[in-house]
Image (spheres, rainbow, N blue to C red):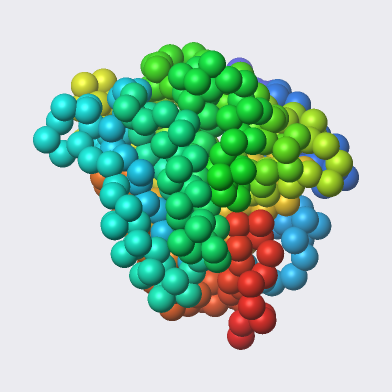
Amino acid sequence: MLKARKVNKLLILFVIKHYLCAAMKAYEKLIEKALTEGYLNLDEGLSLYLDAPLPELMAAAHILRQKAVAGNRVGWIIDRNVNITNVCFSQCKFCNFCRKANDAEAYITSHEEYTIKIRELFERGGNQLLLQGGMNPGLGLEYYEDLFSELKTRFPALKLHALGPPEVVYLAQKSSLSYRDVLIRLVNSGLDSLPGAGAEILADRVRKIVSPAKATTEQWLNVMREAHRLNLPTSATMMFGHVETPGERIEHLIRLREVQEEKPEGSYGFVTFVPWPFQDEGTVLALKHNIRSRVTIIDYVRLVAVSRIMLTNITNIQSSILTVGKDAAMMTLHGGANDLGSVMIEENVVSAAGSNGMLNAEQLQMVIRDAGFVPQQRNQKYEAVNKLET
């Protein structure tokens, strides 16, 4: 006859084994559903994100990557991120870059500076300018129209990947125009594609904490809806690892997926999704609220993998080598990502918060090769711009 203590121990082991088996069956069913192109809901996505072993999560994400973008090519691009201005009324708590209009360090990039920067971009083999900056109260829609028109007149081959939903919302409010009207005027002035800037986490609870003066979740999404109706190529982003919950991360992915599902047939929609971890160095969130970024390599790889699984209607997933470094980036290429982004000749915003992962063209291609893939230079539409590299 077994002693009571031994019986209790066996009972506990039986219960643990029972629940482990049940949990395994649950995540296996969710992976099976994702692989057969069934959209996972919030509860299902969260369960998979929290409970599935990383190897299984990465394997499923890689299968879906191959369905979306078959083969062993990994994209990269040469562009330059020039900030139009560092003056911004928003003063987001994660941003060290923005200044107030009367600050000594406040600036607006001059036309002469654009000329120097664009010529250097062309000399290095790129033709895309990522134009972003703060929501400067002194700059209206006409300023951006004039700027875009002049740059395109002087450099006809230049591609402008510029502004973002928060700027469009701000310009619409400032000009008493609709988002559509603002976008049409910007496109007519030379805008080629719209970045997914300012998404952070698409949950208003989070936005009220980290960026209360910036566009709301619905405003951000509505700008993208209008961009897709105009067939303007867009990207989607996520900055995570601050005050959001895991559930809000999954909710963010679902909101993007829903907007992508609404896009007109044949529209570019979101051509890519780019997640990156919050960079905390010197930020208000870190200094005043003790909110630190504790995202590890494993955390990032898991987030990229679940993004591929949740976003089966967005073709490309870009890994943010700028913010996570080459080791994490190489792992993500085996777990859902098919792109490593830009050489980024210039970058000022996340660098101001501690990011230091910038690479030149040769280094970026070497990372791709070291991971076992073939680098392929591309444009913002994710179209190859030259022959396949070896």
Q: Position of residue 181 (x, y in %)?
A: 63, 28
Q: Position of residue 59 (x, y in %)?
A: 70, 55
- Which residue is farthest left? 104
Q: Position of residue 270 (x, y in %)?
A: 68, 43
Q: Position of residue 219 (x, y in %)?
A: 58, 20
- Compared with residue 36, is residue 211 higher up or lower down, i.e. above or below? above
Q: Is residue 159 visible?
A: yes
Question: At x 58% / y 20%, what residue is drawn?
Answer: 177
- Compared with residue 76, is residue 134 higher up or lower down, i.e. above or below? above
Question: At x 48% / y 63%, what residue is drawn?
Answer: 155
Q: Is residue 332 visible?
A: no
Q: How many marks?
A: 0
For the residue pair 335 and 150, the one nearer the viewer reads as 150
- Compared with residue 217, is residue 154 higher up or lower down, i.e. above or below? below
For the residue pair 320 and 233, the one nearer the viewer reads as 233
The image quadrant where one finds the C terminus is: bottom right
The image quadrant where one finds the N terminus is: top right
Relative side of 90 to 326, left or right: left
- Which residue is farthest bottom? 390
Question: At x 59% / y 36%, what residue is drawn?
Answer: 185
Question: At x 35% / y 57%, what residue is drawn?
Answer: 114
For the residue pair 159 and 211, the one nearer the viewer reads as 159
For the residue pair 142 and 196, the one nearer the viewer reads as 142
